[in-house]
Image (cartoon, grey):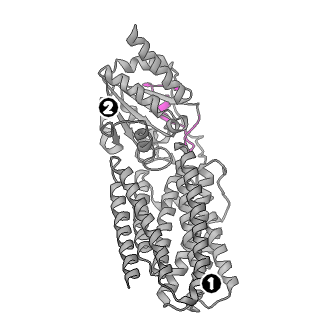
Amino acid sequence: MQVAFIIDSSYFIAAFLFIYGLKQMSSPRSARAGIVLAGVGMVIAVLASFLYSLDVRPEAKPMLQTNMLLALVALSLGLGWAWWSGKKVAMTAMPQMVALYNGMGGGAAAAIAAIELSGYQTHGSISLLLAVLGGLIGAVSLSGSLIAWAKLDGRINKTLRMTGLQLINGSLLLVLGGVAIYIVWQGGQVSQWLFLAFFAMALLYGVMMTMPIGGADMPVVISLYNAFTGLAVGFEGYVLNNPALMIAGMVVGSAGTMLTLLMAKAMNRSVRNVLFSNFGAAADDGEQNISGSQKPIEASDAAINMRYAGKVIIAPGYGLAVAQAQHKLFEFVELLQAAGVEVKFAIHPVAGRMPGHMNVLLAEAGVPYDLIFDMEEINSEFKEADVAIVIGANDTVNPSARTNKSSPIYGMPVLNVDQARQVYVIKRGQGKGYSGVENELFFADNCQLIYGDAQKVLAAMLQAVKNLESS
């Protein structure tokens, strides 16, 4: 009784820390503390699970000792790999790591389901149904997340497009549903080969569902699979009668669902459109008729103009993360502030590779939170800005999203950088964004481009202002 009380109490504390930690993550100021609290909750939940060894029948002790040894080995391997990879990973690769870790969570849920189903003893039809659904969703999340990771990491550079692909995927899903119903109908007493076929088809479906989706939509896909993983974990928690798993799964599932919907809304698209459209693949922009030309400018000239501006708004994008130029950027911002220039940062909801990517990047460089504004808070201020500077962003600042109904990004809310008196764009070359369309902003009369790596460009701008101040 005492052991059971300690386990249940530990799970309650862990659940509270999960929920409170997630609440803390809603603000950049408290996000770090929230992550730590949720991590502490996970440690408590893991340690509590080992207490089951104190409350088993004597005849089960040998098997339990073997399982405990395997669990300790798995924990050691997981902790070692996570510690090493977490220290090594660059900020630009963080979305890939999130996708990878999310896939591992789905895989763990699928593994639990596979073990439960292979030795299933009747616990009721609801438990069996949730075990099957958890296994299906977890397997789809595993393979789908791995494809998302490979796409974000540049290991898969092509999308799978073929006639009738949606019909094939729909048929595969129907077969999976039929097999799931059959397993439940038979009370779980079916051939082991059917279980293997079921999980193999689920893994295949995750691949087939993700391969056609373009890179621009990968952040939404990762968020969706995060919700899937949470749902699978919650189902398996019910099957195992484990409150910590149930609560953690529900929290992750609901948070992932909300994030997916918010991201889709930020792109003015539905989740269905994300999953079944061609956005993110190369678009046919042959009908685009953009007047004007791209006008280059030297970094030093742009920097001096910014030094004498009254208000500057910065719109960062993935190019800033690739160049790891956030520290140089903030150093430049501090120089401008010292000269009396008002500087603000404008963050698009899907800037970078996932929500919050730019916020974390700027926080890492020490940028104060009160300088960072979400799109809806600052979009109306661009018309008052003397200068807007875009660093490595493309689709999120393309004004054609407001006017060109034939554009694949039409309707997507964008930062109103084109409304500033002068716009400077730092970009490595003349390439297009993830959507594959040309950016009208780059040809506008009030826009000039500074070509080059953001790290080197900002270093040159920084030096130009320093030279001006010292002369």
Q: Is residue 218 visible?
A: yes
> What secondary structure characterizes most of the magenta part?
loop
Pick whichever, 173 or 244, lies toward us.
Answer: 244
Q: Is residue 218 above or below residue 231?
A: above
Where does residue 259 sit, x and y in percent of width and height?
A: 41, 58
Residue beneath the point at 39% across and 61% down: 258
Q: Is residue 277 visible?
A: no
| Mark 2, other Cα within 10 Å: few <14 / some 14–19 / many ≥20 | some
Query: Could you say which quadrant of the image residue 269 lies in?
Result: bottom left
Instruction: Pick the quarter of the image with the N terminus.
Output: bottom left
Mark sitting on residue 202: none
Amino acid at circle 1: Ser
Q: Which residues are magenta?
A: 431-450
Label 1 crowd (10 A; few <14 / some 14-19 / many >=20): some
Q: Residue at x 50, y 72 (%)?
A: 232
Helix or strand or loop: what does disc 2 sit on?
A: helix
Q: Position of residue 320 (x, y in %)?
A: 50, 36
Instruction: Report the disc number at residue 118.
Output: 1
Q: Position of residue 97 (x, y in %)?
A: 55, 53
Q: 209 or 91, which is in the foreground?
A: 91
What residue is shown with label 2?
383
Residue at horizontal 41%, vertical 80%?
Answer: 3
Magenta highlight on residue 287: no
Q: In what element is the residue under mark 1?
A: helix
Position of 375 with respect to 226 (left or right) is left
Above or below residue 340? Residue 368 is below
Q: Nearer the viewer, mark 2 or mark 1?
A: 1
In the image, residue 455 sits, relative to residue 267, either above or below, namely above
Depth check: 138 or 401 in front?
138
